[in-house]
Image (cartoon, helix red, strand yellow):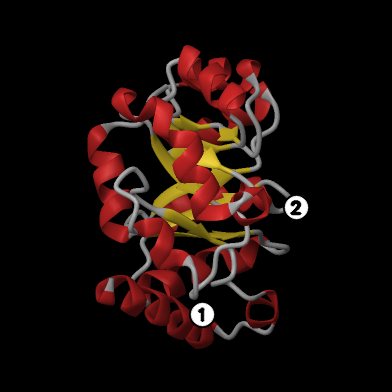
């Protein structure tokens, strides 16, 4: 399923999607609220821990102001479960046609991961126009993305770079007109979450949003 225009516009307004995992379900809601207090209202909670899906449900239920994405969706069943849990969109690290199909059938806007022109063409063939570029920095960064994207520019494809981004290079990606938002896994530091330092998370989110405003 393609991304609704209003959802992409909201992601573009936010400019940054905070990516994170949670080890404990009880951390999910205060973490989402801490990010919201710092100005980040779009998140991607990854399915990398046993607590993940319950955490998705908790945020969907208790922090409705947040545009809630779920990452590391690797199977069709996870795509369906993500939609049922109340998430607004899904993301995967790779380009799995069966996962894209399941997301479409479930009504879950979905961004598959791509890294090569062949990946991108496979995603386009399945109706995707908003894709995750991953791993962004390790693949060659902005220069590589510009080069890869060039032959497809007329199709209106938009990219969501993740992997290796930070406060120092995020502006370079956001300067591209076909990058509405970037993924930031550096914002939520595990040690801050582990000790419940929600004010620290809020401060980091606010710093990132200040960079976006300067851009």
Q: How many residues crowd mark 1 within 10 Å: few (<14), some (14–19), many (20+)?
A: many
Q: Look at 32% across and 23% down and name the residue there.
A: 155
* Residue identified by numbered label 2: 49
The C terminus - image quarter: bottom left
Asked whether residue 213 is in view, the answer is yes
* Residue identified by numbered label 1: 201
Q: Look at 63% across and 82% down and name the residue there.
A: 192
Residue 141 is situated, as x and y percent measured from the top left of the image, at: 56, 54
Asked whether residue 57 is in view, the answer is no
Residue 112 is situated, as x and y percent measured from the top left of the image, at: 55, 31
Q: Look at 76% across and 50% down and name the residue there.
A: 50
Is 114 placed left or right of 16 in the picture? right
Q: Is tag 2's residue or tag 1's residue first in the polypeptide sequence?
A: 2
Residue 27 is situated, as x and y percent measured from the top left of the image, at: 61, 68
Is 109 placed left or right of 82 in the picture? left
Residue 2 is situated, as x and y percent measured from the top left of the image, at: 38, 25
The N terminus - image quarter: top left
Q: How many residues crowd mark 2 within 10 Å: few (<14), some (14–19), many (20+)?
A: few
2 and 1 marks in contact (CB < 8 Å): no
Q: Nearer the viewer, residue 71 or 50?
A: 71
Q: Secondary structure at mark 1?
A: helix
Q: How many marks?
A: 2
Q: Secondary structure at mark 2?
A: loop
Which quadrant of the figure has residue 150? top left
Which mark, residue 125? none
Vertical placement of residue 110 versus 87, above or below: above
Q: Look at 44% across and 55% down and name the residue there.
A: 182
Is 92 placed left or right of 109 in the picture? right
Is 213 placed left or right of 152 in the picture? left
Vertical placement of residue 1 versus 16, above or below: above
Q: Nearer the viewer, residue 38 or 33?
A: 38
Question: What's the CA distance linking mark 2 and mark 1?
Answer: 20 Å
């Amino acid at each position: 399923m393609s991304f609704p225009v209003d959802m992409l516009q909201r992601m573009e307004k936010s400019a940054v999607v905070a990516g994170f995992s949670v080890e404990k379900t009880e951390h999910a809601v205060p973490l989402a609220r801490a990010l919201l207090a710092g100005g980040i209202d779009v998140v991607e909670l990854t399915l990398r821990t046993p607590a993940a899906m319950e955490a998705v449900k908790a945020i969907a239920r208790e922090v409705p102001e947040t545009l809630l994405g779920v990452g590391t969706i690797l199977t069709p069943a996870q795509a369906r479960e993500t939609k049922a849990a109340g998430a607004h969109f899904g993301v995967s690290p790779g380009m799995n046609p069966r996962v894209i199909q399941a997301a479409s059938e479930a009504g879950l806007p979905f961004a598959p991961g791509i890294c090569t022109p062949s990946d991108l063409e496979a995603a386009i063939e399945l109706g995707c126009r908003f894709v995750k570029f991953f791993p962004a920095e390790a693949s060659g960064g902005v220069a590589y993305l510009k080069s890869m994207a060039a032959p497809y520019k007329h199709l209106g494809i938009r990219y969501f770079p993740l992997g290796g981004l930070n406060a120092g290079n995020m502006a370079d990606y956001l300067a591209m007109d076909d990058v509405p938002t970037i993924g930031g896994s550096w914002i939520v530091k595990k040690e801050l979450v582990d000790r419940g330092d929600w004010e620290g998370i809020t401060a980091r989110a606010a710093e990132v949003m200040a960079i976006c405003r300067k851009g």
